Amino acid sequence: MELRFLLLLLLCISGFQAQLYDAMESRAEGQSLVVKCNYGSWYYRPTLKTWCQVRGEICTSLVSTSYTSDGYHNKVTSGRATIEDHTGNGIVTITMEKLQVQDSGVYWCARYYPPSTVYRLMTIKLDVSKVQEYDAIEGQSVSVQSPYNIQDHKKVKKAWCRRKVQNKCDVLVNTDHSYLGYQNSAEKGRARIHDDTQKGIVTITMKNLSTQTCFFQQIVSVQKFHPAVIIIHVIECTVCEP
């Protein structure tokens, strides 16, 4: 049996949460996040800038620019986070490296007045997902599961989609809402989705897997939120036992 290619699939959860944030970013573990926020006015160029994580009613600073006897330090790294204040054009760039699942949360890019006063410039919702990998033989079926937070996403539509290029996910099958209520199961082509809203688990079944699956494409507009990254290795059976 020979490994032919990787089929990259994402579980996408749609919803209205996007209106609460200036941007919603989804990454897999190990990837990086780069955020740019504009503070505009020349008046704020000497002001300190910070990248902080919102916990309750407090935004805890992770990295900030600083003043020392040497002057303004407009680029500072702390742990896996770097902040750089481009005072020439009034833009702050934030970089977070080697993201982990526990980095998921809400962040502010803000003006900072020590020791604890911040004025928000931008709010970012970050979701970091663990990558799951499965092996499957051509012609067989595979079922995968992805848990989610029931409190936040119990009645939110779920979708199973394939990412072929960055920031584009082609939907294969999705749950939906109708006049009868939330339709938690659906099947389309060789893909089936079932949302167990009591346990907070989405189960996906792909039937009759093929090494040609990567050429299937169906584009449906769905707002993607909090994806779980699942890679399926489809193996071609070159010598099969009877």
Image (spheres, helix red, strand yellow):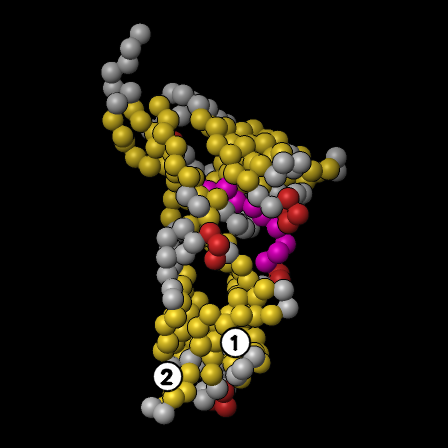
In the rendered structure, does residue 24 fall within the stretch colored magenta?
no
Point out the residue furthest to the top here.
Answer: 242
Residue at the disc numbered 2: 73
**Amino acid at circle 1:** Ala
**Crowding at mark 2 (Cα within 10 Å: few <14, some 14-19, many 20+):** some
Count of numbered tags: 2
Q: Does residue 92 sit above or below 106 in this rendering?
A: below
> What is the magenta range?
9-18
Regarding residue 154, the answer to whether it shows in the image is yes
The N terminus, quarter of image: top left
Looking at marks 2 and 1 on the same chain, the residue that comes earlier in the sequence is marked by: 2
In the rendered structure, does residue 10 fall within the stretch colored magenta?
yes
The CA span between labels 2 and 1 is 16 Å
**Amino acid at circle 2:** His
The C terminus, quarter of image: top left
**Crowding at mark 1 (Cα within 10 Å: few <14, some 14-19, many 20+):** many
Q: Quadrant of residue 140?
A: top left
Residue 180 placement (x, y as % from top left): 75, 35
> Dot 1 lies on which element?
strand
Q: Quadrant of residue 96?
A: bottom left
Which disc, if any, is residue 110? 1
> Dot 2 lies on which element?
strand
Residue at 59% over, 64% down? 55
